[in-house]
Image (cartoon, grey):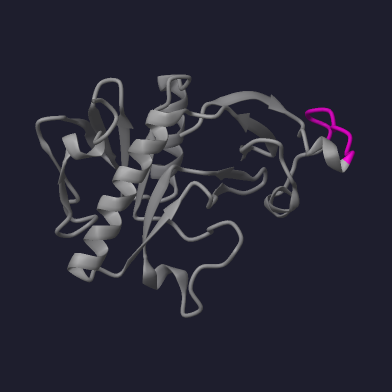
Amino acid sequence: MVHERESVSFRRNRSQNVSSVEAGTHLITMAEFERMPFERRAELIRGEIVECDVPGTIHGIVCVNIAFLLKSWTQRSGQPYVIGSNDSYILISRDPDTVRGPDLFVIEKSKLGKSGPTSGTLTATPDLVVEVVSPSNSWKQIETKVDEYLCIGVKAVWVIVPNKRCVHVFRPDVSAAIVSESEMLDGQDVLPEFRCSVEDLFDNTTF
């Protein structure tokens, strides 16, 4: 995921000529957050806007690789899951509101209701969340996000670490596992029949 910068009240698009609000004077709600234009990507953390740095080319390549592998799995196996990218936001908590934008998520179609996904923030809980570590991320930030995802009922979180070419697998009440480049990443009971080589996640990141 993109690296969080300092918390700001919110820096809305300056072309909109909207002045900033001092941090702490007003906690932003999810509904307000959804209506705001931003100069760069941002997340809502306990009612405050946190801007994000651009994560870089390798990060983007890895995101495409894992998205392709997950989408291919749903098509090949017929599993009833939807794959979402960080264009989608997930509601973490209310009062004050926290809204995160994971790099990828997987959710069973039945959780989205008969009408399917909406254009707003996802309020249903994904089955899997994937975060790709960027150079500016700290591990503390990653751990905070992992804890948030697991606390809302996400069954598994995969943290892909490009510079170490491995995946950290987090699940509730289970010690984290590290899957190395030479091993297979298994969806286990979270994503039935999904298996891929960790090496494939880093395809085209080196030549």
Where residue 174 appears, as percent x and y from the top left, is 22, 38
Say if the magenta span includes residue 18: yes
Residue at the spot x=26%, y=32% of the render? Answer: 168
Most common secondary structure along the magenta stretch: loop
Where residue 81 appears, as percent x and y from the top left, is 32, 65
Residue at the spot x=71%, y=48% of the render? Answer: 33
The front one of 186 and 66 is: 66
Q: Is residue 115 left or right of residue 48?
A: left
Name the residue furthest bottom. 114
Name the residue furthest front. 207
The front one of 63 and 151 is: 63
Q: Quadrant of residue 139?
A: top left
Residue at the spot x=17%, y=54% of the render? Answer: 194
The front one of 130 and 181 is: 181
Say if the magenta span includes residue 155: no
Q: Is residue 28 left or right of residue 175?
A: right
Residue at the spot x=26%, y=64% of the render? Answer: 74
Q: Is residue 181 above or below residue 194?
A: above
Q: How many numbered callouts?
A: 0
Q: Which residues are magenta?
A: 17-25
Q: Is residue 53 above or below residue 119?
A: above
Q: Is residue 20 above or below residue 114?
A: above
Where residue 3 appears, as percent x and y from the top left, is 52, 26
Q: Is residue 141 left or right of residue 176?
A: right
Quadrant, the C terminus: top left
